[in-house]
């Protein structure tokens, strides 16, 4: 599984950083930053799905 | 700029501020008789009818199920209220057709000589692109998660002190008002401290918030009286910060620069008013709704007491089910919106709380699911105006609940709750009988 962040859609709701800090950080203005690349560790796939399904702006997607 | 001229700049602006602009106009002559009880929510919608907030979820559901996704009213000179997640999202994202110039529906509109869009009277909430991004960027930094998280200890100690001040509580006997004895005091104290305003002015702040948000169907003169007192107070605090800078949000705004220029006095004052107004009733409402829910739903209360880890999801479900904030926009030009003939300067309400209960957007939307894992709720808005204070609001909501149930693991509703009036929805009286106290 891979996870993608559309930074243009992110409005800084901060849900991903709270639910999946292994995958997302936030900058000084509260905008999300994706901190992983490539295929996810299988142990983090649930976190990626959780982050995606709690982003109000649909800025996070996952692909299998 | 010298200190003296800084000082004068604020003095001269005294009492000229109004969130609706200094030169508002009434599209239709205000007549109190026009604002009687609503009998038809589809064609005579009025969110300031006292019957609205207590039963709003049923009104939204009835309207959606009867094939009315957008309610309308001639009140306030013309208001529309989209009630589905899809339509609320569309309006929130469309800043060309729907201006944020004024976000609180009332009997008057900002006049041509008032602060024009894109700046508005309380930037950035009243700003449109492109100025919006400039004003917002300044205020994003102090409200970013890593700036807000360190407030946790102070918020927790504030909550504990409020619980201590309730005095001697006898389980099974003592009745407290969870709204006015507890929830009400939390956000007003936190934002007052962040702004660096005197703690003893708490009751004054609350009066300003009330006059801005709960007098929307009063004559313009009544509202202007309230705004003038608010402006006078804020100017006094700002002048004090000009003379005595310190490490708080007011001094931060006074020192903020855009391309090397300080912000205008109107911008600083407007943004401070935004923080004071937007941060108080909203969060108070969210905390109150959560406590009311827990007083009425023993199994959810028990789950939180026994499984504290559920709180991460519970906070979001409280926000989804009981979102306090409905925003508003002004239509920028005549247009057809999904069959609705909208006219320039019509109001459009953005009922995010209604969007959150739309079954097209959420599974089992009417049910409160305390550990709901998929929750893209819109309690803090959608698009470029996402609530600046959302990280702070979440922190206050979580800690207020944690501390309340830590002190009172068991409690029940002991009478009728009473609800707010207007765009901010939350209980204003929550009679609670305490059944268990931990020392």
Image (spheres, coloured by chain):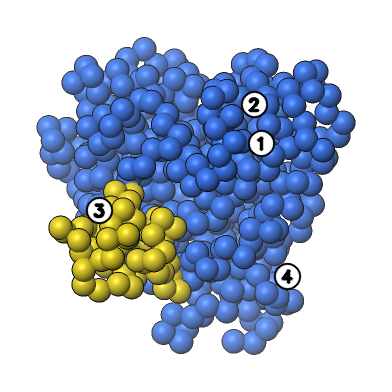
Q: SS for tag 2?
A: strand
Q: SS for tag 1?
A: helix
The nearer-to-camera label among 3 and 2 is 3
Query: Same chain for the residues at labels 4 and 3, yes or no?
Result: no
Per the model, the C-alpha gap separating discs 3 and 2 is: 37 Å
Nearer to us in this view, B52 or B151:
B151
Rendered shade, chain B: blue
Q: Chain of mark 1?
A: B
Mark drawn on residue B405? 1
Q: Is B276 placed left or right of B30 in the picture?
A: right
Answer few, some or many: residues within 10 Å of disc 1's Cα (few below 14, many 20 plus, some between 14 and 19).
many
Q: SS for tag 4?
A: helix
Per the model, the C-alpha gap separating discs 4 and 1 is: 40 Å
| Labels 4 & 3 near each other (Cβ < 8 A) | no
Q: Residue B88 in the image: x percent, y percent?
A: 27, 41
Mark drawn on residue A58? 3
The nearer-to-camera label among 4 and 1 is 1
Q: Residue at x 25, y 66 (%)?
A: A40
Answer few, some or many: residues within 10 Å of disc 4's Cα (few below 14, many 20 plus, some between 14 and 19).
some
Which chain corresponds to the colour yellow? A
């Amino acid at each position: 599984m891979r996870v993608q962040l559309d930074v243009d859609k992110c409005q800084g709701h901060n849900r991903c950083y709270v639910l999946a800090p292994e995958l997302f950080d936030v900058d000084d203005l509260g905008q999300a930053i994706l901190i992983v690349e490539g295929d996810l560790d299988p142990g983090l796939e649930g976190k990626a799905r959780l982050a995606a399904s709690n982003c109000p702006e649909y800025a996070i997607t996952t692909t299998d | 700029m010298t200190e003296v001229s800084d000082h004068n700049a604020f003095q001269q602006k005294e009492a000229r501020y109004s969130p609706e602009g200094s030169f508002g106009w009434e599209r239709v002559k205000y007549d109190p008789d026009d604002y009687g009880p609503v009998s038809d929510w589809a064609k005579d919608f009025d969110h300031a009818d006292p019957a609205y907030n207590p039963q709003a979820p049923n009104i939204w559901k009835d309207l959606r199920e009867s094939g009315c996704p957008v309610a309308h009213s001639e009140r306030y000179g013309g208001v529309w209220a989209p009630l589905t997640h899809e339509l609320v999202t569309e309006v929130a994202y469309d800043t060309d057709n729907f201006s944020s110039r004024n976000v609180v529906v009332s009997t008057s509109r900002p006049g041509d000589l008032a602060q024009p869009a894109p700046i508005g009277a309380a930037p950035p909430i009243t700003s449109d692109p492109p100025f919006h991004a400039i004003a917002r960027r300044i205020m994003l930094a102090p409200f970013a998660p890593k700036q807000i998280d360190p407030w946790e200890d102070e918020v927790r100690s504030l909550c504990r002190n409020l619980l201590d001040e309730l005095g001697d509580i006898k389980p099974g006997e003592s009745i407290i008002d969870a709204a006015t004895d507890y929830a009400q005091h939390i956000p007003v104290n936190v934002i007052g401290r962040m702004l660096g305003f005197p703690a003893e002015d708490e009751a004054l702040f609350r009066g300003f918030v009330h006059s801005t948000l709960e007098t929307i169907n009063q004559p313009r003169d009544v509202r202007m009286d309230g705004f003038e007192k608010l402006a006078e107070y804020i100017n006094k605090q700002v002048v004090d910060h000009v003379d005595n800078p310190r490490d708080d949000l007011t001094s931060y705004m006074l020192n903020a620069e855009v391309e090397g220029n300080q912000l205008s006095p109107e911008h600083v004052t407007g943004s401070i008013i935004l923080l004071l107004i937007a941060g108080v009733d909203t969060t108070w409402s969210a905390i109150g709704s959560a406590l009311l829910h827990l007083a009425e739903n023993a199994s959810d209360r028990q789950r939180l007491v026994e499984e504290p880890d559920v709180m991460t999801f519970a906070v979001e479900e409280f926000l989804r089910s009981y979102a306090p904030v409905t925003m508003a926009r002004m239509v920028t030009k005549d247009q057809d919106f999904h069959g609705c003939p909208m006219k320039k300067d019509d109001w459009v309400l953005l009922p995010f709380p209604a969007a959150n209960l739309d079954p097209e957007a959420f599974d089992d939307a009417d049910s409160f699911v305390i550990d709901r894992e998929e929750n893209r709720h819109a309690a803090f808005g959608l698009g470029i105006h996402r609530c600046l204070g959302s990280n702070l609001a979440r922190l206050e909501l979580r800690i207020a609940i944690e501390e309340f149930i830590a002190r009172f693991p068991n409690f029940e509703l002991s009478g009728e709750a009473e609800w707010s009036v207007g765009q901010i929805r939350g209980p204003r009286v929550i009679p609670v009988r305490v059944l268990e106290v931990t020392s």
